[in-house]
Amino acid sequence: MKISTDEVAKIAHLARLEVDASQKEEMAEQLSHILGYIDKLKDVDVEGVKLSSRAAFMNNVLREDEVKVSAGPCVTLANAPQRDEDFYIVPRIVK
């Protein structure tokens, strides 16, 4: 598939990128080359290949939830630079 410099300009505009004329030519060539590789996928024989929804066949790899006793504010706030009772004090960000 051949990509034109106009299509590169449109893609750059949508991506909010500034692209000069010399870059448009180079990008058009590179994108055309990439899409050429993707076009080769049309020729791949997938007869008999089982459909899947993801590349890796994994079951849930997350650990089970375990109820544990909290260390409490004395431990969790021990290294806080500033605190007010059981709360961290942080610099104001929104004015």
Image (cartoon, rainbow, N blue to C red):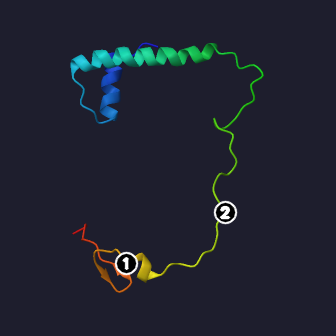
What residue is at 70 percent from the left and 35 percent from the top? 52
Q: Secondary structure at mark 2?
A: loop
Which residue is more in the foreground, 28 or 30? 30
Residue 12 screen position, x and y as percent: 31, 29
Against 89, residue 5 (above or below) is above
Assess disc 1: are there few (<14), some (14-19) or many (≥20) residues with their C-alpha within 10 Å of its C-alpha: few
> Which picture quadrant has residue 24?
top left
> Which picture quadrant has residue 39?
top right
What residue is at 60 percent from the left and 75 percent from the top? 68
Residue closest to the far right: 48
For the residues labelled 1 and 2, the Cα–Cα distance comes to 29 Å
Residue corresponding to mark 2: 64
Q: Is residue 15 left or right of residue 56?
A: left
Residue closest to the far bottom: 85
Which residue is more in the foreground, 88 or 72? 72
User: Where does the C terminus fall, quadrant-wise?
Assistant: bottom left
Residue 25 screen position, x and y as percent: 29, 15
Proximity of marks 1 and 2: CB atoms separated by less than 8 Å: no
What residue is at 24 percent from the left and 26 percent from the top? 19
Residue corresponding to mark 1: 78
Which residue is more in the foreground, 92 or 62? 62
Q: Is residue 47 left or right of residue 77?
A: right
* Residue type, numbered disc 2: Glu
Q: Choose the circle earlier in sequence order: 1 or 2.
A: 2
Query: Which label lies toward us, 1 or 2?
Result: 1
Q: Secondary structure at mark 1?
A: loop
Q: Is residue 44 left or right of residue 32?
A: right
